[in-house]
Amino acid sequence: MSIAFVPTAIENASSAMKSGKLTATVFVFAMCAFAQTNMPTFKVDTKSALVWDSDSPGIASSIIWDPLTGREIHRLRFGEVEVSSLVGYERVSWNAAGKLLNYRTTITNNTDSELSVQYGGAAVDGHTALPLWVALKNKGFKKRDRTKIWEMSKMHCFNTGFSSKENFFSADNLSKVFTIRPNTSLTISSVTMDPRRSSTLCSVDGCHLTGTIRYYITVNNRDYVFVWPGKSVIYCGE
């Protein structure tokens, strides 16, 4: 699967909302299935984007702390819909320098109607962070596909419960739509590979990610964009 994403659109959305001048800038990304040749294009107008930590009427942006783990949670509220975000990372393996970025998003529906939730996109320091094809196990898939699948059972962030194994977005089915009934909530996970060759900074106080991660999810055709400084990203590996 290949995805073309314009990460600067998120930054443009943020500045546009802060200045009160919503432009016709769009998020543009395309996707195609592994066995398909068609490449449908999706466009999202910045007028529908809600950016975390922006100054815009009707949007409540905040940081809350998990009382049990002390984790930092970014929360966006618009009307009766609340979306909260956590981002964690782990090593690809002990023999590889790459990092996996785990996105955990909880959508709370306090309305009287159902909500539809779709995958949005992610970028790290202006570089596209492509979603991975994830599954509980690679058994049952065609032999040629097994090498492309990332097994949740082998990813520490899923095994510790940081990321949800029940509801997730995967690169082989990014058009999937989750439905949230009134007065209920749902937690959805997704995983990308950090596109940078070097992404951590270590000192006597430990290691943390550098740069800035931007991730967005689409709820009822409205994009909830979360901005995460590297230091705020949780290490959920071993």
Image (cartoon, rainbow, N blue to C red):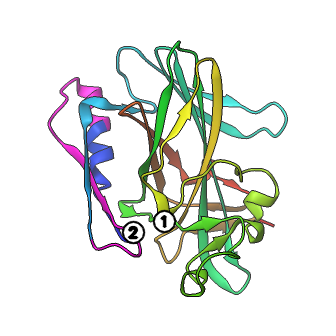
Side of 191 relative to 237 (left or right): left
Q: Residue at x 74, y 58 (%)?
A: 158
Mark 1 Cα-neighbour bin, 10 Å: few <14, some 14–19, many ≥20 = some
Q: Quadrant of residue 108?
A: top right
Q: Which mark is residue 32?
A: none
* Chain part drawn in magenta: 14-37
Q: Residue at x 48, y 65 (%)?
A: 172
Q: CA distance from mark 1 to mark 2?
A: 6 Å
Magenta stretch contains residue 66: no
Q: Quadrant of residue 148?
A: bottom right
Could you tell me which quadrant the C terminus lies in? bottom right
Q: Residue at x 64, y 34 (%)?
A: 186
Q: Amino acid at mark 2?
A: Ala
Location of residue 109 in the rendering, given as x and y in whole percent from the top left corner: 57, 22
173 versus 139 height, above or below = above
Reading the image, the residue beneath label 2 is: 33
Pointer 1 with pointer 2, Cβ within 8 A = yes
Q: Residue at x 55, y 81 (%)?
A: 145
Location of residue 142 in the rendering, given as x and y in whole percent from the top left corner: 58, 81
Reading the image, the residue beneath label 1 is: 172
Q: Nearer the viewer, residue 123 or 140?
A: 140
**Element assignment for label 2:** loop
Q: Amino acid at mark 1?
A: Asp
Q: Quadrant of residue 6?
A: bottom left
